Amino acid sequence: MRVLLVGGGGREHALALGLAGDPAVEALVAAPGNPGIAAVAELREVTPTDPAAVAALAVEVAADLVVIGPEAPLVAGVADAVRAKGIAVFGPSAEAARLEGSKTFAKDVMTAAGVPTARAYTCEDAAAVAHALDEFGAPYVVKDDGLAAGKGVVVTDDRAAAERHAAECGRVVIEEYLSGPEVSLFVVTDGEAAVPLLPAQDFKRVGDGDTGPNTGGMGAYTPLPWTPPNLVDDVMRDVVHPTLAELRRRGTPFAGLLYVGLAITPSGPRVIEFNARFGDPETQVVLALLETPLGGLLHAAATGTLGAHPPLRWRDGAAVTVVVAADGYPAGPRTGDVITGADRAGIIHAGTRRDADGTLRSAGGRVLCGTATGPDLAAARDAAYALVRDVELAGSHHRTDIAAAAVDGRITIPG
């Protein structure tokens, strides 16, 4: 199988490692890729959000499967353009990707499907914003209605800050706050059959103790020892299958990766958001424990044969990833700094570039992450931080508490 992987971040590096490790994948091309992906794939230049360009590249490289990593190409219709060439693609259509591209659309689908989620209003002017904030009270949850690279959400007790964010976004969804620890659940689906991966927990805030502004994610871990034993089954029954059925009813079936962001509230799991692709950095830890060949799994979803795919196999133990961010991230990350100590197993490249002379430099806000496995969470955590400590990048920062509460048994479900 020849595979074309679209994207160039940390999620795509993790996907590239998984695909390269599948014996059925005889050739892997990544576009545009990054210096880490270059170790396991041929890199090609392409604008990921240009449907015609990606489809033409898929034809040129004779791809049997195209895997689309980021959300923006999906919302732009890249999967549709590739499918029109008769090539199997892992990723939903532009219409189905509206689950991530529009928070309002996602809420409409959830309401129609009876999915448990927060009450919400879509607001486009200051009066509507004020009414919603008055009704729900603090903490205020204000979400940009469109794509925002994981940084379009403000959760704050500061009314003025909530109003400012709403004004900056223009069209927002304002929700009631959902209390309880958060869980990310990835579901591989061909539109009918659906297979859950291991639940993971992401850390969105930039600082220890969940302080500071939201980011694209500062770390993650799996498995989650504190979740109810029936969590995945309940979410598949109450969230995933009703959502897929509603999208089929609308004539826009969802095939690809459905990301379900959950809050485990005193009343049970509630959906915070849907995404239309693998999450970053949760992908790094979930795929680190997946023993089933990745290429075959994604190809089954892309070709409507997921129902016949064998049950997934998982490695024992745990996985932890810790993100190393550039100076100034997330507000205004500095780029171009030299990186050393990054050419080791377990280092995932997210925002890097390499000079002609081989020098590795920062090229984004989230630059690298150290991803490690171990027999338990404590061992995986220690190994991930050992990787991060050996990376040198001027002004960089990382959280020091990834998975700490889970290791110490400090996460409880309210109720």
Image (cartoon, helix red, strand yellow):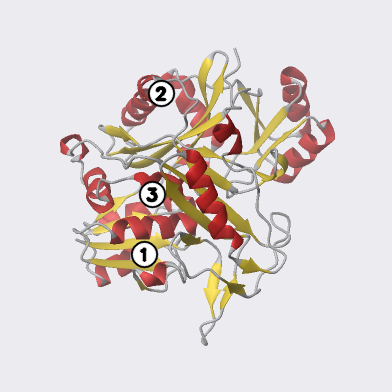
Residue denoted by label 2? 235
* Amino acid type, mark 1: Val
Mark 2 in CB contact with mark 1 (< 8 angstroms): no
Mark 1 or 3: in front is 3
Taking depth in this image into account, of 148 and 395 the one nearest to the observer is 395
**Disc 2 secondary structure class:** helix
Q: Rate crowding at label 2 as few (under 14), some (14 to 19) or many (20 or more) other CA atoms within 10 Å.
A: many
Residue 381 can be seen in this image: yes
**Disc 3 secondary structure class:** helix
Residue 248 is situated, as x and y percent measured from the top left of the image, at 31, 30
Q: Quadrant of residue 142?
A: top right
Residue 279 can be seen in this image: no
First in residue order: circle 1 vs circle 3? 1
- 342 vs 235: above or below: below
Residue 36 is situated, as x and y percent measured from the top left of the image, at 45, 68
Q: Quadrant of residue 402?
A: top right
Residue denoted by label 3? 288
Whether residue 60 sits left or right of residue 326 in the image: it is left
- Marks 2/3: CA distance? 23 Å
Mark 2 or 1: in front is 2
- Marks 2/1: CA distance? 34 Å
Q: Rate crowding at label 1 as few (under 14), some (14 to 19) or many (20 or more) other CA atoms within 10 Å.
A: many
**Disc 1 secondary structure class:** helix
Q: Point out the residue furthest to the bottom here.
A: 357
Q: Rate crowding at label 3 as few (under 14), some (14 to 19) or many (20 or more) other CA atoms within 10 Å.
A: many
* Amino acid type, mark 2: Val
Q: Quadrant of residue 6?
A: bottom left
Q: Point out the residue furthest to the right here.
A: 160
Residue denoted by label 1? 54
First in residue order: circle 2 vs circle 1? 1
- Marks 1/3: CA distance? 28 Å
Whether residue 149 sits left or right of residue 99 in the image: it is right
